[in-house]
Amino acid sequence: MTTIVIVLVVGVVLVLTAVYISWRAGRLDRLHIRLELAREALDGALVRRAAICLELAASRILDPATSLVLASAAHEARTAGVEEREHAESDLSRTLRAAVDQERFREKLAERPGGAELFAELEEAVAKVVYSRRFYNNAAGVTRTAQRRFLARTLRLAGYTEYPGFFEIDDDPPRAMAAE
Amino acid sequence: MRVGLVCPYSWDMPGGVMAHIRDLAEALIADGHQVSVIAPASDDADLPPYVTPAGRAVPVPYNGSVARMSFGFISAARVRRWVRDGGFDVLHIHEPLVPSLGVLACWAAKGPIVATFHASWTRSRAIAVAEPMLRSALEKISGRIAVSDAARKSLVEQFGGDTVLIPNGVTVSRYAEAEPLPGWGPDGDTLGFLGRMDEPRKGLPILLDAFVLLAERRPGLKLLIAGPGDAGDVYDRVPAALHRRITLLGMVSEEDKARAYHSVDVFCAPNTGGESFGIVLAEAMAAGAPVLASDIPAFRKVLGEGQAGALFPNGDARALAEEAGRLLEDPDRRTVLSEEARRAVRKYDWSTVARDVVRVYETVTSPGAGVVEDRASAP
């Protein structure tokens, strides 16, 4: 009799543990999916920002000096390796601020054909870098906490996914584009 | 884009969050998006075509006040069906920490979910108890928006991470044109105030003190006050001889509010703090009323450091009286301020706000992957 009870209790405990573990694993899996989508969005936003900067630099709307610094900063950001990426993207933000915050930049751009559209696209791209980075860092923070949990570490619930890092850059928009 | 908006509070009761969702929905529709809103409301309620009722709302005390919310099996099932049938590209939940439709929607759906946090709240026992439950709902949210610095601060302190800030909007066109109220009109001697009379942070007592000071010098000076509150509070603060020069409209309709802004020469916003944005100020600016406001940071920002409206030192009734007197003497300056205000407020128009919100949607969505029912949580 007692043996049956013990077997039953052990059985129930095992089933509950398994359910709990699979729930934790499922949750971690969902977090990884969210993190991956956030990463893609961030990558997309950064690539788009650099592309528009290059387009602006090549448009002959700006003076040659501004065009040159903007083009080289955008190029650096695009070609930087994993290690230098945050650095290069921050540099692009700073260059962009220096360029856009020139006196009457927006008005002068708007006088040229296609200039107003280009400004609007750039503004959107800059805003999306800010948004997607916040969302990515948020997802990274939650995932890091979940991966660090005792159960996740001991049972390697995260599998072979790497421990996510935050993406820390200076992404302050130029004053003329500041949304906040 | 197909957007599903979730409103936590009853659609029949006007309030800040509900008005925000209505204006956002209408701005998105005007922009060509397909929008569906689910909100607590009874089936026979008179609703705009884009609102789906989720059942009658029940008054429940939560976070220090009583709110009308929906929950329970029926609401949960309706939210689930709405998510399943909606085919949304993105789900946008408002106030996901309020135990109402937002939490239910988080539970029933998966995919791109955006959430907007409106209120700020202090760390309460209720939130602490509910935190593990709320946390798993919050984990499904891919993009978080706060409408004010205060809301953002309390969210970050409570749950960590970061949010983007997209302030409230004002529908500029709703206020731009209106007839002055009957018997009123900018006549060079009318001050205006709009807001709760009994809420000290709105600063009405400061304005009343200033009015007493200025009324001595200007025999024609009048004060028009719109907003709920006790008339006694106002009349007790000023000498009896001045009572007939102060008019209390009480609570006004949207339409009369717009007309009130057009009835004054100087609109006063003596708020002493706590304003995250100052929606009233933005409405007055949209109406082109010359504004005189306290120099709290939020107002200085909205008024472009004084370019789109005059400022006075916060809490200083004497300075308010002086500056109001100067403005009443100077019609040219009022015209300039009115034009500058109309220009500056465009930045806060709903079309701009909706554009920023759409950017958030675009950031969290990827082609071909919309919102679907989360079967893991199905009953």
Image: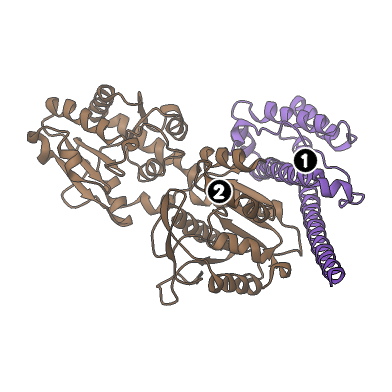
Chain colours: A purple, B brown
Which chain is home to disc 2?
Answer: B
Residue at 28% over, 51% down? B259
Residue B149: x %, y % from top left: 53, 38
Residue at 60% over, 53% down? B115
Q: Residue furthest front?
A: A1
Which chain is home to disc 1?
Answer: A
In the image, B134: left or right of A68? left
Q: Residues within 10 Å of mark 2 (few under 14, many from 20)?
A: some
**Nearest the eye: B374 or B279:** B374
- Above or below, B261 against A96 in this view is below
Residue at 21% over, 42% down? B224
Q: In which quarter of the image is the C terminus of chain B?
A: bottom right
Residue B300: x %, y % from top left: 44, 30
Q: Which residue lies furthest to the bottom in this view?
A: B44
Could you tell me how far apart the alpha carbons at marks 1 and 2 are, in whole angstroms?
A: 49 Å
Q: Is there CB contact under 8 Å for labels 1 and 2?
A: no
- Above or below, B29 against A168 in this view is below
What's under tag 2, amino acid-wise?
A: Ile
Which numbered marker is on residue A55?
A: 1
What's under tag 1, amino acid-wise?
A: Glu
In the image, B169: left or right of B221? right
Q: Can you identify the residue that label 2 sits on?
A: B127
